[in-house]
Image (cartoon, rainbow, N blue to C red):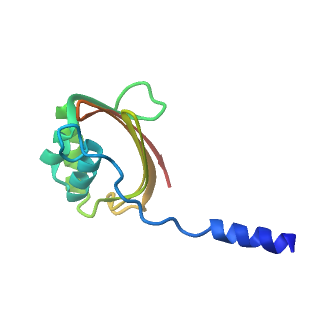
Amino acid sequence: MKFVLSLLLCIGCARPAPPCRDTLPPSANGGVHPVAGQLAAYNDRHIDLFVSYFHPEVELFVHGEPAPFVKGSAALRESYAKMFKASPLLHCELERRIAIGDFVIDEERVSGLRGGAPVHAVAIYQVKANKIVKAWFLRGR
């Protein structure tokens, strides 16, 4: 009996999670939160709108690396415009989101990257004054 109860509890835990809803509050100026906005612009491959959610001196890091792979909005625009052009089927599906203070942590599945297999990723965004100032990315398969 104890085994059956354990098995039932385990099966209950294995249910797929419901789709993630955007749980971020509006930005301080009443508009779209910058993390939600940049994700929508990313999926639309709308480079101007995408860049508008980031601070002009934004820094993007691969988690654990000391130097940013993107520094400043000009480098952000150049890097992501190339990716958007090279990957017309690019799409990021939000799986989970945690917001704590100035930080938003997204678990994501990214597909359509140059026709490759979907990528499991985590993005950690730091937001100040309604702009993303820093982000760190972790990737898996």
Answer left or right for 90 relative to 15.
left
Residue 106 on image: x %, y %: 41, 48
Residue 61 on image: x %, y %: 38, 33
Give the residue furthest to the left: 48
Answer left or right for 103 relative to 43.
right
Q: Quadrant of residue 60?
A: top left
Question: In the picture, which quadrant includes the N terminus?
Answer: bottom right
Task: Please name the residue shown 21% across and 47% down the image.
Answer: 32
Answer left or right for 38 relative to 137.
left
Residue 21 on image: x %, y %: 37, 59
Task: Please name the residue shown 30% across and 46% down the image.
Answer: 25
Give the residue furthest to the right: 1
Residue toward you, 105 or 76: 105
Task: Please name the residue shown 46% across and 35% down the image.
Answer: 63
Task: Please name the residue shown 16% across and 53% down the image.
Answer: 46
Counting labels gives 0
Q: Is residue 102 above or below residue 91?
A: above
Q: Is residue 9 above or below residue 102?
A: below
